[in-house]
Image (cartoon, rainbow, N blue to C red):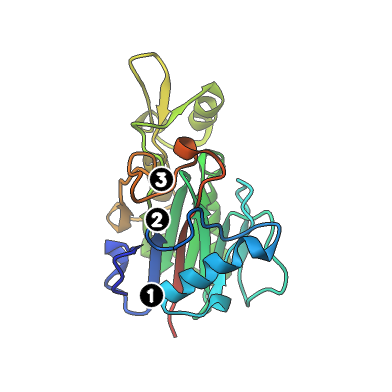
């Protein structure tokens, strides 16, 4: 896909049977695009514009209603009703573009080129400490016989460790569950903790058996890159959302 309005990933670029992307502020004409909502009028136009940018049909796009869980759903067809209370999708079906939306949380995409399985994961701090990435890999193994050593993973733009100051609730949870937690937190000059969501999810991927060489971290901070990405911490919860998706091509 040759589109300057859409961010792609180096590790995925060599796979001709794969579409993988993250949108930017330039991708969609709407000022604050959303891809789910209480009414279809809240997201239909955004999905139509996104599908046009990607060169697919809007009906091929599938978004869950995210609630910061570690719930993972296998997609066997385009569902009639909305997939609720879910923060990760997996499928082996070509032509279905599974997506998540973010505005500071971490988008993680997974691809098993051997079994031809893809996953899209939404990992905020809650999802990260609940190890949603590990849950997703486990379900890929159980449902599709995916072996972790074959997975290619990308960690997309989110709020970066330089900006992401957090409280004791987050730090305590990180220390309990995140492997090598000391690599993911640091104190600033004011004695406040910062959390590195990128490194935390990378450590969870490695603990799950993913080869470090098969993990790409873009290192782009959604807060700092105000011209490129939406940020809830910078602009408030009602700001727009980036869409991150992955699809096996026919």
The answer to whether residue 23 of the structure is visible from this angle is yes
Residue 37 drawn at (x, y percent): 65, 57
Q: Which of marks 1 and 2 is in front?
A: 2
Q: Is residue 116 visible?
A: no
- 193 up-or-down from 11: above or below: above
Q: Earlier in the sequence, mark 1 or mark 3?
A: 1
**Tag shown at residue 241:** none
Mark 2 secondary-structure assignment: loop
Disc 1 residue crowd, few under 14, some 14–19, many 20+, Cα 10 Å: many
Task: Write down the residue under mark 3.
Answer: 158
Name the residue carrying label 1. 18
Q: Position of residue 49 (x, y in %)?
A: 48, 70
Q: Do the residues labelled 1 and 3 touch (CB within 8 Å)?
A: no
Query: In the rendered image of this protein, does residue 155 appear above or below residue 53?
Result: above
CA–CA distance in space, label 1 to label 2: 23 Å
How far apart are the alpha carbons under marks 2 and 3? 14 Å
What residue is at 53 percent from the left and 65 percent from the top?
46
Which of these two is toward me, 244 or 154? 244
Q: Which of marks 1 and 3 is in front?
A: 3
User: What residue does disc 2 label?
Assistant: 25
Instruction: Give the vertical position of 97 relative to 231 (above or below).
Output: below
Query: Viewed as shown, does residue 20 lie left or right of 80?
Result: left
Q: In this view, does 56 lie to the left or right of 169?
A: left
Check disc 1 and report its element: helix, strand or loop.
strand
- Assess disc 3: are there few (<14), some (14-19) or many (≥20) residues with their C-alpha within 10 Å of its C-alpha: many
Q: What element carries label 3?
A: loop
Q: Residue at x 64, y 56 (%)?
A: 65
Q: Which of marks 2 and 3 is in front?
A: 2
């Amino acid at each position: 896909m040759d589109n300057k309005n859409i961010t792609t990933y180096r590790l995925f670029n060599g796979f001709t049977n794969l579409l993988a992307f993250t949108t930017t502020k330039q991708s969609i004409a709407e000022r604050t695009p959303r891809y789910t909502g209480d009414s279809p009028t809240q997201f239909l136009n955004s999905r139509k514009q996104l599908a046009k940018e990607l060169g697919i049909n809007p009906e091929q796009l599938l978004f869950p209603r995210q609630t910061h869980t570690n719930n993972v759903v296998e997609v066997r067809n385009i569902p009639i009703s909305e997939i609720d209370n879910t923060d990760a999708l997996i499928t082996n079906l070509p032509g279905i573009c599974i997506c998540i939306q973010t505005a500071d949380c971490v988008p993680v995409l997974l691809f098993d080129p051997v079994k031809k399985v893809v996953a899209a994961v939404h990992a905020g701090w809650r999802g990260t400490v609940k190890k949603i990435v590990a849950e997703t890999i486990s379900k890929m193994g159980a449902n599709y016989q995916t072996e972790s050593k074959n997975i290619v993973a990308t960690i997309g733009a989110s709020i970066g460790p330089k900006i992401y100051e957090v409280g004791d609730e987050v730090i305590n949870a990180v220390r309990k569950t995140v492997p090598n937690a000391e690599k993911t937190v640091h104190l600033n000059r004011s004695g406040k903790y910062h959390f590195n969501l990128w490194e935390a999810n990378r450590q969870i991927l490695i603990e799950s058996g993913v080869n470090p060489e098969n993990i790409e971290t873009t290192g782009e901070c959604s807060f700092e890159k105000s011209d490129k990405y939406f940020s809830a911490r910078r602009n408030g919860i009602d700001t727009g959302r980036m869409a991150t998706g992955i699809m096996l091509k026919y």
